[in-house]
Image (cartoon, coloured by chain):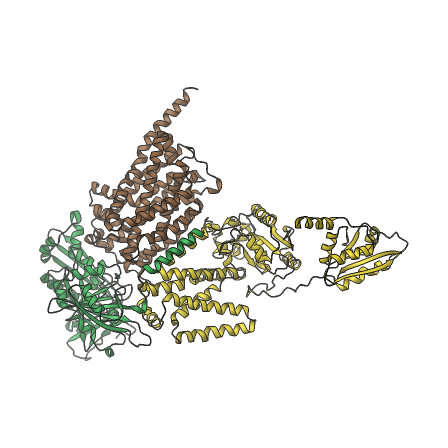
Amino acid sequence: MDINVKVKPNLQIRAFYLFFIIAGIQLGVGIIGAPKFIFVEAERDSWLAILIGFLFMCVVVGVMFFILNQYENADYFGIHVDLFGKWIGKFLGTLLIIYLGASFLSILMTYIQVIQIFLYHALPNWIITSLIMILVLYTVFGGIRVVVGVTFIFFIITLSLLTVLYDPLLRINMYNYLPMFQASFPELLRGAKATAYTFAGFEILMIIYPFVSNKRNAKLPVYLGLTFTTFLFILITMLSIGYFSAKGLKNIDWALLILVKSASFTFLERLDYIVVIVWLMVIIPNLVLLMWAMAYGMKRLYKIQQRKTHYLFTGIILIAVNYFQYGHQITKLTDFIAKTGFWIVYIYPLLLLPIVLVRKKLKSSGRSKPS
Amino acid sequence: MWNRRKRSQSDQSDEVIFPLKIDELKNLLVETFVNSSSLNFTKYKINNKNVAVFFIDYQVEGAKLGPFLEPLLEFDSDKEFTYQTLLNGLPLSTGSTSNTLKDIQKKLISGEAFIYIEKEKQAISYPLTIKETRSPGKAETESLVLGPKIAFTESILKNMNIIRWQINSTDLVFEEFTVGKQAPREVRIAYMKSVANEDDVNTIRQRIKELDVDQIEGTIVLKQYLEDSQTNLFPQFDETELPDRFAYNVTRGKIGVLVDGSPTSFIAPATLFSFLESTEDLYMRWQAGSFLRILRFLAMFFSILVTPTYVAAATYQYAIIPSQLLVSIGQSRAAVPFPPIFEALLLEFLLELLREAGARLPTKVGQTMGIVGGIVIGQAAVEAGLTSNILIIVVAMSALSSFTTPSYLFGTTIRLIRFPLIILAGFLGLAGIVFGVSFLLIHLLRLTSLGRPYLVPIYPLRLADFNKVFFRTPFSYESKRAKSYRPKDLIRFNKKDAKQKRDIDE
Amino acid sequence: MRKLTIMIFSTMLFLSSCLPTLQLEDLGVITSQGVDMTEKDEIEITMSVLQFQANSTSPTTIVSGVGSTIKGAVEDAGQKVSQQLVPGKLELEIYSKEVAEKGIQPYLDTLRRDANIPDTLFLAVAEEKAKDIFHIKEEYISTNIGEFLHGLIQPGSEQRLFPGISINKFSTYINNEGIDPIAPIIGLREGTPVITGIALFKDDKMKGQLPIEFEHYFTLNEGTVREDLVEFELPMEPFTEYLPKGSGDEEKLKIVALIEEGNGKIKLKDKKALKFDTNIKIVLNLLEISRQYKLDDPKAIAQLEKEIEKQTKSQYEDILKYLKELNTDIFGYGMIYRTNKKGGKLTDKEWDEKYPNIDVTFNVKVDIVRHGTVNR
């Protein structure tokens, strides 16, 4: 297996789209429920906690860029093999793919739960899943160009959902934010950790990076994407804090959806229904990017056709969703993903860094000796 | 057996048949044109030599025969009388010679008149073709309020002539191709040498050359043969009968295709948005032009979404309807015995019937048809309790919106898309609509036209092209051609000169 | 592609049998409902329901049901109509005084749990029985009862103040330690429902009430008031020098004015001594005055402003005294106290003890900026 990837020019994407890829994969189901989890930890200073999360994320992304730049055109799978040898490298790559698959499932299940609570109580899991999988498969069969296109266009379209937030903005109670700066540092850190599930997803950078055509300009869009997500996250969390009472927010599962429940236009009421349904367009980019990354990883590791992985995984998902019938199962899954995700997405690159550095040194000394 | 016979026959027709006796030639020709009595075969004796003049009656213009025959009959007897001297002697410029039967047949049916001097090696022929065409008339399918009214005709010569006068430049190329094995037709691709993208020209050249069909029925059929995906619902090249639209697109770096005998042309590559452009936008002031373009856009979305939304709201999500409207919709629905999806499909079906009947009937009857259908049947349907009156408004609005599309083909596509969406909405409510729209979007993202993305300039994003696609800016801001099509030459004119301003009182 | 088509069609086939439809004409859409207690301590729900029938003049019917839970009562009511009752358009819920005094938390809980019930739902308290309001003769009002009641409650669309108390606002206030909610009281006057008063809650229990005339004292405190009519009755003596002679001898000077803009702000002056300042600012447009008055004299206007300030201030003090007696903190002094407290935490119990001891100074500032086209 090659450590570096050769990408045909017609499959390359402009660095500009990294913004949408990063923001698109980060904004998903996490943000609907996240305000509660952060508020429980950091209370009124949640925005500080999110900012800490953001800074940490920036450091991690910086490390990712550093690692990537040590190679010519490599991704996670190639780097693993390069650092740890064929067997361990492939094992780590497989673990990563399993993690991606599990987060795919967790996103899907959370959305299905939302749909069932808000709209279609009687719609079985597998029907919603097959509908969503039709869209996902149709996209990934188009290749990376279509995957990025879907991410981009759906992102732009769903941005219009933000207008719905005008209503809670007018109803907030400013006193809910006072007094500020009361949370202790450990509380803030715990709050920051609670952002992990929502912010996760940017590890896709380590997989999609070889496809970027102008790598020199790649950093800015990635950081802008992270900033945009953070901004949106802070906005929604702060709106929730201002809109709900402290006691109330701790008991609200889907804060974002309850926020928009009182919004209406003169020609359209119950915008929460619209938001719930159009949220499909928010999670589709999530799902297609994960699906693409998985199949691409399988191809890199085991030379399995992407098409085959897609069919296989769709089959697994269609069977797996029927297992989740109760809310607590989904919560368990999400918790598990949040916990493992924290280690895989945030901590792992930091652990990788010293190994990469040592190896670099060994290589350069090894090279200098014979000469 | 059959194969061999066929080959021997073709061998025979490819052979040089001359020299021959006149009677032998006549027999040979009568044999090939069995059952067609229009072959005019006349024998003359000039300068002691037997001369045959033959042509097909209806393919030859009678008025031209005089100047052709007269010099022949009065041929100077001093000169040697061979086909060479005759070719030089006759005062017509386009003479040619042929010596095989196949060649003679081909030329005869395309309207050439032959002279054969007995025992000569070649026969001489002159095109005295008569080609029945209609003179250019007013555009029928694409009508404009402002701008030139002339439309393409069935004659490719006239069409090229019209375009030449629209684009009076040596840069404009009409490349000639012949398509069709059995009944060949002349096909021309038109592009600006210094502007059009080389790859695109090569692609379309190659696609035309590789086309292996017996015959094509016209431009729109050729268009379907050449498209990236023939199974697709969306048209991938833009068709037009307006020379000004053709010329506008060609000067902007696209490639136009004309087919002999077909009064429409098509332009490649196209995007989803090029179907919503009309040259009229250019003739309007830029504000009005932008307004109309945005209006057409909204109309497209409206047309696709409004009936499905009604169905979804009346079947599942009643709560999205504002309270005041809920009462009126509910009351009008109460009289209808069908579920909303059936009601909507019925009415859409009725409307499509009306439209189709209006298109097939003669113009005058067609107009009455629209009025009768629209008012009388609609009213009766409501009174009979077949549909609710709110739905009549909804369906009429969505139909009206679909008619605003400048391209008739694309308008049909939009009308067709509605039906699956209505069905989805009837089964799944709003979620069905969002599912359907997402599916459409992904589908559009996967589409290409001549290998170029269908959704450009949205994806891949080219902000600089937005003012050529989604709205219009004053011409001084449109100094560049659309980057989306990657023209060879991006600059139309110098931006600085256009923007130069004089000081006050200068 | 073909595989996808097959997949879509097969899914659709299954779907058609799976999803229960809510066809508009088969629904009874509840627009407002009243909650009462029967003698047997059961819940009685009276609903105004939109029923769709062709060519019927009034689409609303009144249905009622009894049950031990709210959903049970709705179920019971549902058996009396041919349609399926759905709450997706519920706009107003009225509690009888008896229910409100017992506490409405359990009812709120049901409303909030159901994702189908909109958050724009308004709450109100009935003067006596809630069902009386629904059982009025339709000729007294111009539209159907549900719409009428909703119109009564709904303020201008951008004003989010009393009497439009939405369920979200109400429950936020219940959950907030330093503030207590209010709700409008709806009663019958000559057979027509009107807002007659303001119900004062302590958490979810109604403790007392004030007449509707005091509305502005609450709205001013809640947010910015615009375009609202107020009436003042002032004693005559301070104005004698600005009144033209011999133009009448009433005892009171009556004024009607439009609040162009008015708002109130609470400040904590002294945390230990629980001293608060409430600063009220009102900009008035004078519309009506019961006597001829020298409005072109700046001093006369100043005098008028001063008297209005004085009266408003004493009214506020009276209201606060009453609120302290009930131990309900409508104005939200507790919230201000909490925001200034270290840690920002306050328990209900702690504030209950402290609230009666707070000391509030009301600073009222009135500006009359316009008085119409005539001076006298």
Q: Quadrant of residue B382?
A: bottom left
User: What residue sits 23% from the left and 41% below the top?
Assistant: A189
Q: Residue furthest top?
A: A370
Please tell me in which quadrant of the rendered image residue A183 appears.
top left
Q: Position of residue B303 (x, y in %)?
A: 44, 63
User: Is residue A266 something one can see in this rendering?
Assistant: no
Residue B457, percent from left and from top:
47, 51
Q: Is residue B350 left or right of residue B161?
A: left
Asked if A367 appears above or below C171 in the picture, the reply is: above
Instruction: Identify by letter the chain in yellow.
Output: B
Q: Which chain is brown?
A: A
Q: Quadrant of the C terminus of chain A?
A: top left
Q: Nearer the viewer, residue C53 or A61?
A: C53
Looking at the rendered structure, the number of numbered marks drawn on it comes to 0
Q: What chain is the green one?
A: C
Residue reaching furthest to the right: B78
Quadrant location of the N terminus of chain A?
A: top left
Indicate whether A45 appears above or below B363.
Answer: above
Residue A149 at what x, y percent from top left?
43, 48
Q: Position of residue B97 (x, y in %)?
A: 77, 51
